[in-house]
Amino acid sequence: MSKTLIIVVVIALALGMYGCSSYNGLVQTDTNVQEKWAQVQTQYQRRADLIPNLVRTVQGAANFEKSTLTAVIQARASATQVKFTADQLTPENVQKFQAAQDQLSGSLSRLLAVAESYPNLKANQNFSELQAQLEGTENRIAVSRNDFNGAVKTYNQSVRSFPNNIFAGIFGFPVKGFFEASQAAQSAPTVQF
């Protein structure tokens, strides 16, 4: 065998091994993103599952504003309709999901703010427990979103860095979208005393 042929075979083997290693690394980071996305969805589903109980408690305990309850119910319905798999985590899809969830968060905030003016509702044990569960769920959502963003950051760095970007393009590993702060969260609220 000629020396040139041996060098070509060694280079081809090295490139093949690097390609396999690169592919496996991309699969690993992609799987991590999928796991973190599943955790995000689980926490949002938990929140969506709490809402009907909260609405029933509010309806039963107070002559509550119907428009506020209707807004919460409609926002929950639209938020639970925005669904896609972890393979579809494009920036646009994440933004649609986030917009629907932000609408629901806003409706829930208004519901809880209006509930403050109903003393018998604030004294209701079931309402207090649901409110505490909702608060805990919101905290878990924040943690899972941060974990998801960390996984997406690692994945996107891997997909965009050279020479992994070549293999990512060949094997179909697109850049994934982050959760970003909503427009309302970008500006500080005005506080007046």
Image (cartoon, helix red, strand yellow):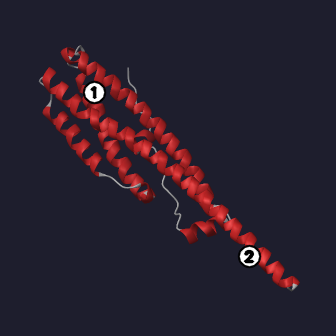
Q: Which residue is mark 1?
A: 112
In the rendered view, would you say 57 is above or below 158?
A: above
One can see residue 179 in this view: no
Q: Residue at x 20, y 30 (%)?
A: 55
Q: Residue at x 66, y 67 (%)?
A: 19
- Numbered disc 2: secondary structure: helix
Q: Residue at the far right: name it.
A: 3
Query: Residue 60 or 19: which is nearer the viewer?
Result: 19
The answer to which quarter of the image holds residue 92 is bottom left
Q: Residue at the far left: name it.
A: 63
- Numbered disc 1: secondary structure: helix
- Left or right, 97 with respect to 54, comes to right
Which residue type carries mark 2?
Ala
In the rendered view, would you say 2 is above or below 151?
A: below
Give neighbour class at mark 1: few <14, some 14-19, many 20+ (Cα, 10 Å): some
Q: Which residue is mark 2?
A: 12
Q: Residue at x 51, y 40 (%)?
A: 146
Where residue 191 sits in the image (x, y, percent)?
40, 26
Where residue 167 sits in the image (x, y, percent)?
61, 68
Give neighbour class at mark 2: few <14, some 14-19, many 20+ (Cα, 10 Å): few
Number of the front mark, 1 or 2: 2
- Left or right, 1 with respect to 125, comes to right
